[in-house]
């Protein structure tokens, strides 16, 4: 039995990578991990040449990656949340799976897990990836999300930027609760002169949020891997 893990995060050893690998490890199957940012998989060009052959004619690394997809009994895909969506790496990969769904629904006997890491809108992303795979005929046995390291922790000017993520996703500005304040409590302290979009002012107390420090999140990844194991 084979399970393929695909990460759409371009960050080295990212939380997305860690979670995809944790799911893979728990499957007990022969596994392989592919990081899309290290290969070249472009978007679908809508030429429709795949419609009768189930083969994408675009010449890039999807050629061999699609063979690995076809050989796998299960697939684990993970993406960071960028602009409320999957990363462009992941979006391109999913678009290219379009070539496998015509006439024969070639992905239909495969099981899948989707996961997304983000600060605020990661649930939408994990759900969207699951819906996309279901549209190709795959059985999605589980979906999970995790809060990750916001870019503001690592960019440099994060402490004085008027556009810090806390301001953008604050209940005060959005009128919605994305769980940001709760998740990042202890990671930063907003100072009294902070004014969203005018004057950023925050003190960072920790600069990295690792899923490895969250036993519940790692346990969920393991559980999803075990679910795949039961199904293949
Ligand atoms: C270009 C860009 C756009 C982003 N947009 C969002 C967003 O819309 N919502 C969100 O929750 N996080 C957003 N983020 C933050 C990432 O989702 C966050 O840093 C995440 O932890 C990255 O996961 P990774 O470390 O596994 O790659 C964005 C990050 C980048 C680089």
Image: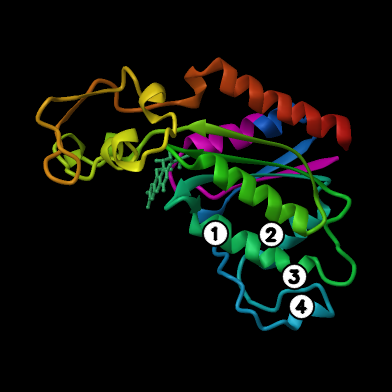
Quick one: 100 or 181, which is closer to the camera? Answer: 181
Tell me if label 3 and label 4 are in contact, CB under 8 Å: yes
Question: Which type of secondary structure does the marked residue at label 2 adopt?
Answer: helix
Q: In which quarter of the image is the C terminus?
A: top right
Q: How crowded is mark 2: few (under 14 residues within 10 Å), some or many (20 or more)?
A: some
* Apparent side of residue 28 relative to residue 38 in the rendered image (left or right): right
- Residue 56 location (% of width, % of height): 72, 74
Q: Which mark is residue 50?
A: 4
Which region of the structure is painted magenta? 1-22
Picture quadrant of residue 152: top left
Viewer-side label of 2, 4? 4
Query: Magenta includes 11?
Result: yes
Tell me if label 2 and label 1 are in contact, CB under 8 Å: yes
Residue position for label 1: 39
Identify which residue is drawn at 64% across, 77% down.
Answer: 58
- Residue 174 location (% of width, % of height): 35, 42
* Apparent side of residue 170 relative to residue 83 in the rendered image (left or right): left
Residue position for label 2: 65
Question: Which type of secondary structure does the marked residue at label 4 adopt?
Answer: helix
């Amino acid at each position: 039995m084979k399970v393929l893990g695909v990460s759409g995060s371009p960050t080295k050893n990212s939380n997305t990578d860690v979670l995809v690998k944790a799911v893979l490890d728990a499957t007990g199957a022969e596994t392989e991990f592919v990081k899309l940012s290290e290969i070249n998989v472009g978007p679908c060009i809508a030429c429709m040449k795949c419609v009768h052959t189930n083969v994408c004619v675009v010449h890039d690394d999807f050629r061999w990656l699609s063979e690995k997809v076809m050989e796998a009994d299960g697939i684990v895909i993970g993406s960071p949340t960028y602009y409320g969506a999957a990363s462009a790496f992941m979006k391109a990969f999913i678009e290219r799976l379009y070539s496998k769904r015509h006439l024969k629904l070639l992905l239909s006997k495969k099981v899948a897990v989707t996961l997304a890491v983000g600060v605020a809108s990661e649930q939408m992303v994990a759900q969207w990836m699951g819906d996309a795979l279901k549209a190709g005929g795959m059985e999605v046995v589980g979906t999970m999300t995790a809060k990750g390291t916001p870019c503001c922790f690592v960019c440099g000017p994060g402490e004085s930027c008027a556009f810090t993520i806390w301001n953008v996703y604050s209940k005060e500005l959005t009128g919605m609760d994305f769980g940001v304040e709760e998740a990042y409590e202890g990671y930063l302290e907003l100072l009294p002169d902070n004014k969203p979009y005018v004057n950023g002012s925050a003190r960072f107390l920790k600069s990295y949020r690792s899923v490895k420090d969250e036993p519940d999140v790692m346990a969920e990844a393991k559980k999803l891997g075990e679910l795949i194991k039961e199904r293949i």
